[in-house]
Image: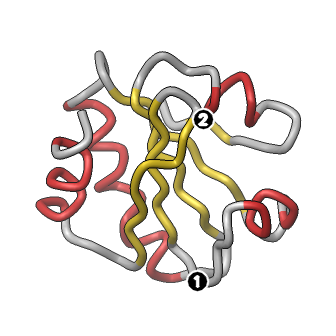
Amino acid sequence: MTKSITSNNFNSDVLENEKLVLVDFWAEWCGPCKQIAPRLEELENKYENNLSVCKVDVDQNRDLALEYNVRSIPSLLLFKSGQNIDTLIGAVTLEELEDFVTRNL
């Protein structure tokens, strides 16, 4: 299940997570963000043993958006062992998402 992330739980749920973590920086008003949400859920279900998917609402967590240089949404950041290892921006296809994840597993 996709987890909501704030400044309070970012370290424990993203940086200290043993799995690969895909963080979706999004906003309620963002059409493309809503468009990819079902794809992210599908991806999380497919790779549930190796992948956690989390969402950061940029309107409510501007500090995290600034810290990770998020300039447009949706921005998808992959974290492994506490490090941001890859970024994908925009409303991408399920195939692009899957490639993004599998090349970093």
Residue at the spot 37% in from the left edge and 66% down from the top edge: 36
Mark 2 or mark 1: which is in front? 1
Q: Residues within 10 Å of mark 1 (few under 14, many from 20)?
A: few
Residue at the spot 67% in from the left edge and 41% down from the top edge: 4
Looking at the image, what colour scheme do you see? secondary structure
Q: Which residue matches tag 1?
A: 72
**Residue 47 horizontal/vertical position (percent):** 24, 28
| Secondary structure at numbered mark 2 | strand
Q: Disc 2 residue type?
A: Lys
19 relative position to 11: left or right = left
**Residue 102 horizontal/vertical position (percent):** 17, 42
In the image, residue 9 sits, relative to residue 53, either above or below, namely above
21 relative position to 48: left or right = right
Location of residue 49 (image quadrant): top left
Report the disc number at residue 26: none
Q: Disc 1 residue type?
A: Ser
Location of residue 8 (image quadrant): top right
* Chain-order first, disc 2 or disc 1: 2
Q: Which residue matches tag 2?
A: 3
Q: CA distance from mark 2 to mark 1?
A: 21 Å
Towards the viewer: 104 or 35? 104
Towards the viewer: 52 or 70? 70
**Residue 78 horizontal/vertical position (percent):** 44, 48
56 relative position to 20: left or right = right
| Secondary structure at numbered mark 1 | loop
Residue at the spot 61% in from the left edge and 67% down from the top edge: 26
In the image, residue 86 sits, relative to residue 101, either above or below, namely below
Residue at the spot 18% in from the left edge and 51% down from the top edge: 98
Label pair 2/1, CB-CB below 8 angstroms: no
In the image, residue 38 sits, relative to residue 89, either above or below, namely above
Towards the viewer: 81 or 10? 81
